[in-house]
Image (spheres, coloured by chain):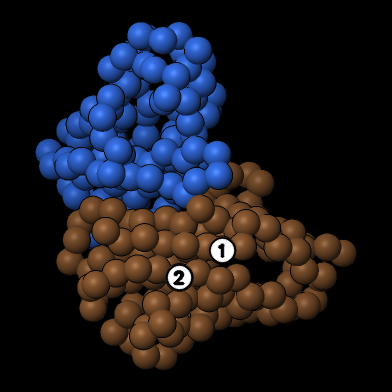
Chain colours: A brown, B blue
Amino acid sequence: AQTVTQSQPEMSVQEAETVTLSCTYDTSENNYYLFWYKQPPSRQMILVIRQEAYKQQNATENRFSVNFQKAAKSFSLKISDSQLGDTAMYFCAYGRRGSQGNLIFGKGTKLSVKP
Amino acid sequence: NAGVTQTPKFQVLKTGQSMTLQCAQDMNHEYMSWYRQDPGMGLRLIHYSVGAGITDQGEVPNGYNVSRSTTEDFPLRLLSAAPSQTSVYFCASTPGASPYNEQFFGPGTRLTVL
């Protein structure tokens, strides 16, 4: 069964600095998707970034980028120039391509950005 | 567009009561899903639908029913509430019949079962 592990329950970073959140996953599949979702205190889940496993190039979205290491089954999220609005829970998620069902979510990392 | 709406925002039930959590989206999305989020856990899929008239079970379906009579609405029914169903429930939708495009989430319903 696929699993997603986020080994950092909590992290903090100073405003304007860079922080990296870790995610590892376990799968025997070759085609899949990986996601980072953000859940701010408002509770609304928001997609941060998405990576398709067959694409070697790391996805980027403005200040957010990933380091996707397929062989190591690692999918870390880097946030550059951290802002107070980045304070949130961050969830890593895995989805098997061709399946209409589950996204498998990790337990989340609580990120606090300090002024 | 209102996006994905959920009602109610909060609900307290007694053990054995039944209720329906409402979910609606106005984006004409085919795929809709229900998740539950427990403290210290990520989201777990309860049920999903790839279009009107089609539903299927996710990871934790026991104790819940769904139906999808229209594209817009995807209600979740608790048949006989149990304390183990105390959780925050999220509805989500995505364009196309796949969850791997961006999922748009509702604001959640916090349910407490006494």
Considering only vertical position in the picture, is A91 above or below A14? above
Q: Residue at x 47, y 76 (%)?
A: A75
**Percent position (x, y) of residue B110?**
52, 29
Which residue matches tag 1? A7
**Mark found first going from the N terminus, 1 or 2:** 1
Which residue matches tag 2? A24
- The answer to whether the residue labelled 1 contacts the one labelled 2, judged by CB atoms less than 8 Å apart, is yes
Label annotation for residue B109? none
**Percent position (x, y) of residue B95?**
29, 58
Left-right relation of A39 to B18: right
Q: Are marks 1 and 2 on the same chain?
A: yes
Left-right relation of B49 to A61: left
Considering only vertical position in the picture, is B44 above or below A84? above
Q: Give A87 or A92, whichever is nearer the viewer.
A: A92
**Percent position (x, y) of residue B80?**
31, 14
User: Label 1 sits on what residue type?
Assistant: Ser
Q: Helix, strand, or loop for circle 2?
A: strand
Q: Residue at x 28, y 25 (%)?
A: B63
